[in-house]
Image (cartoon, coloured by chain):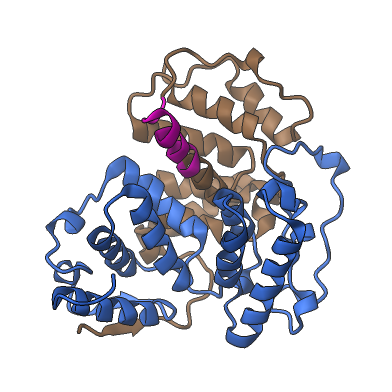
Chain colours: A blue, B brown
């Protein structure tokens, strides 16, 4: 199901091994830690991630434990893996190839995209920091790494066609948005948090 | 503080014409044409659907986000081979009339090779970030790609098919 043949690895499709069979229904989150994905399900090794095998295994288990508590597996796995490996591109690939239940059915919203990018621009001073701030906040809201990178590739190429990021007067570009902003369910708590941070920033405090 | 007034908690992973920025008519047409082009090989559905929505002027970010949410069977799980991506990118970017045209050309061929939009965007993002870090700038090819300089032995058939297709073509001639 979550078959990933590995970056650079050459596999003949005719000789491909059958995919690992998930122990539970493919449409829902497992009910036990042992039934969650493991690194071996992705046909890549810890060495591909420049990490110790035990650290990678622990990251997968920690993400599963968190998901059983709060139902958010995809983002949990991302944040656990980046603690133990610096190969973020492969982490993105693993997480982007998780089953649908790992992220739920929400799709990212354009309003949240602008809000978070405005915040990243308001609180960081270099392009990598801007990307990391954007990615961290959007993933916490339930976005996938692929959603982030799809936007970032286009942004680096085309900039912001609306000009809202440059014209903004508010750290979250709220002055550039309509009175009713449309967010997905997972984006709301992150928006609320950032709004509090923005208020603190504008009043001269805060720990942005 | 402005409160979010609409939170859509019932949204399923289906294609949404409003999210994609296309009319209902173009939406239906793209789905129909994509299914028709896919024919009996479901592993090419992701590619064909992306192409038809691109041709319908779908918003580019929404397009990748939507196609990435198709099931794995829509891409065929052929895996990735970095050498193929490197060759195709060189071919797509050499003498491209614009960066955007080069990006779309590269993306089309890698989708055809069985890559998902997320894999393509990750390859582009991290590759160019590394170039900026190591070389100070993003590199663009100044010579035509030399396909003989790559070792394509053992690559998946679908990757080979794309290499064969572009090997003797110059995309912007």
Q: Is residue A133 left or right of residue B152?
A: left
Near-viewer residue (B90 or B101): B90
Q: Position of residue A208 (x, y in %)?
A: 28, 70
Image quadrant occupied by the N terminus of chain B: bottom left
Res A8 → quadrant: top right
Q: Is residue A153 left or right of residue A22?
A: left
Q: Is residue A112 above or below residue A199?
A: above
Query: Looking at the image, which residue is at 47% across and 21% down?
Result: B171
Q: Position of residue B45 (x, y in %)?
A: 62, 50
The stretch of residues the image draws in magenta is B125-139
Q: Main secondary structure of the magenta part?
A: helix
Image quadrant occupied by the C terminus of chain B: top left
Q: Position of residue A134 (x, y in %)?
A: 37, 61
User: Magenta segment: does it hold A33?
Assistant: no
Query: Looking at the image, which residue is at 86% across and 40% down?
Result: A14
Q: Is residue A75 above or below residue B101?
A: below
User: Magenta segment: does it hold B134?
Assistant: yes
Res B79 → quadrant: top right
Q: Mark yes or no: residue B70 visible.
A: no
Near-viewer residue (A104 or B54): A104
Q: Is residue B156 above or below residue A206?
A: above
Q: Position of residue A160 (x, y in %)?
A: 24, 51
Query: Looking at the image, which residue is at 44% across and 51% down?
Result: A150
Q: Is residue B9 above or below residue B70?
A: below
Res A32 → quadrant: bottom right
């Amino acid at each position: 199901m979550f078959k990933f043949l590995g970056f650079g690895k050459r596999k003949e499709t005719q000789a491909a091994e059958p995919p690992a069979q998930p122990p539970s229904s493919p449409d829902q989150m497992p009910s036990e830690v042992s039934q969650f994905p493991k690194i071996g399900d992705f046909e890549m090794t810890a060495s591909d991630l420049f990490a110790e095998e035990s650290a990678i295994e622990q990251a997968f288990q920690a993400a599963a434990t968190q998901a059983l508590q709060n139902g958010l597996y995809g983002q949990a796995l991302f944040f656990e893996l980046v603690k133990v490996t610096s190969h973020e591109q492969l982490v993105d690939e693993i997480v982007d190839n998780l089953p649908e239940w790992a992220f739920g059915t929400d799709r990212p919203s354009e309003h949240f995209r602008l809000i978070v990018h405005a915040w990243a621009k308001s609180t960081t001073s270099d392009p990598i920091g801007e990307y990391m701030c954007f990615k961290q906040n959007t993933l916490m809201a339930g976005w996938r790494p692929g959603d982030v990178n799809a936007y970032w590739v286009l942004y680096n190429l085309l900039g912001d066609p609306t000009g809202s990021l440059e014209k903004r007067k508010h750290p979250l570009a709220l002055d550039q948005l309509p009175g009713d902003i449309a967010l997905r369910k997972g984006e709301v708590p992150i928006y609320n948090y950032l709004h509090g941070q923005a208020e603190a920033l504008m009043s001269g405090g805060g720990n942005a | 503080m402005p409160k979010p007034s609409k939170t859509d908690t019932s949204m399923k992973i289906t294609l949404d014409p409003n999210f994609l920025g296309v009319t209902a008519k173009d939406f239906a047409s793209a789905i129909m044409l994509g299914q028709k082009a896919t024919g009996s090989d479901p592993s090419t559905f992701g590619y064909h659907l992306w192409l038809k929505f691109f041709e319908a002027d779908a918003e580019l970010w929404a397009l990748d986000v939507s196609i990435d949410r198709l099931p794995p069977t829509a891409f065929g799980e052929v895996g990735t081979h970095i050498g193929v991506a490197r060759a195709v990118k060189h071919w797509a970017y050499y003498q491209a009339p614009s960066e955007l045209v080069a990006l779309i050309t590269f993306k089309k061929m890698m989708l055809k090779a069985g890559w998902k939009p997320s894999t393509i965007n990750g390859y582009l993002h991290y590759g160019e970030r590394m170039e900026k870090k190591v070389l100070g700038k993003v590199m663009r090819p100044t010579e035509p790609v030399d396909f003989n300089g790559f070792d394509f032995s053992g690559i998946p058939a679908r990757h080979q098919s794309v290499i064969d297709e572009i090997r003797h073509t110059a995309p912007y001639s």
